[in-house]
Amino acid sequence: MKEVIRCAVLGLGRLGYWHAENLAYQVKGAELVTVIDPLAGRAEQVAKELGVSNWSQDPDVAFHDDTIEAVVIVTPTSTHADLITRAAKNGKHVFVEKPLTQELSDADKVINTLQQENVFCQVGFMRRFDPAYAEAKKSIAAGDIGKPLYFKAASRDGNVPHEEFIKHSGGIFLDVAIHDYDIARFLMGQDVSSVQSTGSILLESNQFMEKYNDVDQGLTYLTFDSGATGDVETMRIAPYAYDIRGEVVGTEGAIQIGSMRSTDVKLLTNKGSTHDLIQDFPSRFQNAYLLEMIHFISSVQQGKTPNCTAADGKAALEIASAATESFLSGKKVELKKDTEKTVI
């Protein structure tokens, strides 16, 4: 097993910075040697803050450095296919934030390149590594609730993205609900066979979304290969908290995942009771982001395929694309059966 994996991070926005910080300070076996961002001065700033020796605006600096074994891609979705392909052709293992690619047509090309170059790719579906979701997966796999019959998820966020982000995000089903589509496959242990979705713009201030065929609230109904079903509620306008929850109902019980509480403290007074609420995704999934990066580096060290692969990324992208198509057409969409199935 390799003791140290030399890494580069491409894209140093908020999430890219967190990944870089984790690699620099908290992931055993990782050495962050290069940070890259196209914005003038950004990479140099982050390099100084994190004590990294090299920085650049050009991804080729990392791709052409033979001492770098892994790259972490946290760039706009539209760049993923090109950057993954270039990384793979230069022999780099890849961690890429979701989605795998923006266009479903690019997913197979990317996967073929990864296979041809014999490199790993882990997609950043961090919920799989969140302790609550990971424990739920173990419980379901152990048969604690019997055969899974129904999946339910709610992703409610009150932080509405600005218009320029919405313009390029790919829509609520690709940008937000895709996390729930992936965790649905993960928990249910099977693929999705059909999708039907709807959506609305509920706030007057979000009417600008209409020109991008987007909404601030969406609902997706899923049917799985076994005949099991589920629903995914997605919302950008929750005024009270960052509220992420899931549930699986089985033949012998149910398992519920997630809490809105930031801490397990409840205040009781003669006016009633209160507890604090989680307000953003960094607070809710900070540990999961670290754990997924630990898993990626460990996978590269051991030469083992990570448990959230490019094939998983493609499967979630297929569901998101079908949900978007269903929303636009108003019709149920069947997923193709000739796609590669993955072990979940």
Image: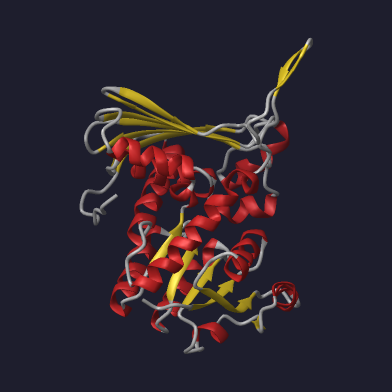
Q: In this view, does 197 lie above or below 73?
A: above
Q: In which quarter of the image is residue 140?
A: top left
- The residue that appears at 31% across and 38% down in the rendered structure is 188
Q: In this view, does 326 lie above or below 302?
A: above
Q: Which of 244 and 196 is in front in this view?
A: 244
Displayed quadrant of residue 52: bottom right
- Whether residue 80 is visible, yes or no, is yes
Q: In the rendered view, does 139 fall on the left or right side of 34?
A: left
- Which residue is depicted at the point 36% across and 41% down? 137
Q: Say above or below: 152 vs 296.
A: above
Left or right of residue 320: residue 79: right
Estimate the x, y position of residue 205 in percent, counting from the top left.
Answer: 73, 36
Nearest to the observer: residue 91 or residue 283: 283
Residue 241 is situated, as x and y percent measured from the top left of the image, at 66, 33
Q: Kindly identify the residue that appears in the image at 53 percent across and 61 percent down.
A: 77
Residue 193 in view of the camera: no
Q: Is residue 99 left or right of residue 165?
A: left
The image quadrant where one finds the N terminus is bottom left
Q: How many marks?
A: 0
Q: Where is residue 192 in the image (x, y as percent from the top left)?
A: 30, 41
Residue 122, horizontal then vertical, whole percent: 41, 63
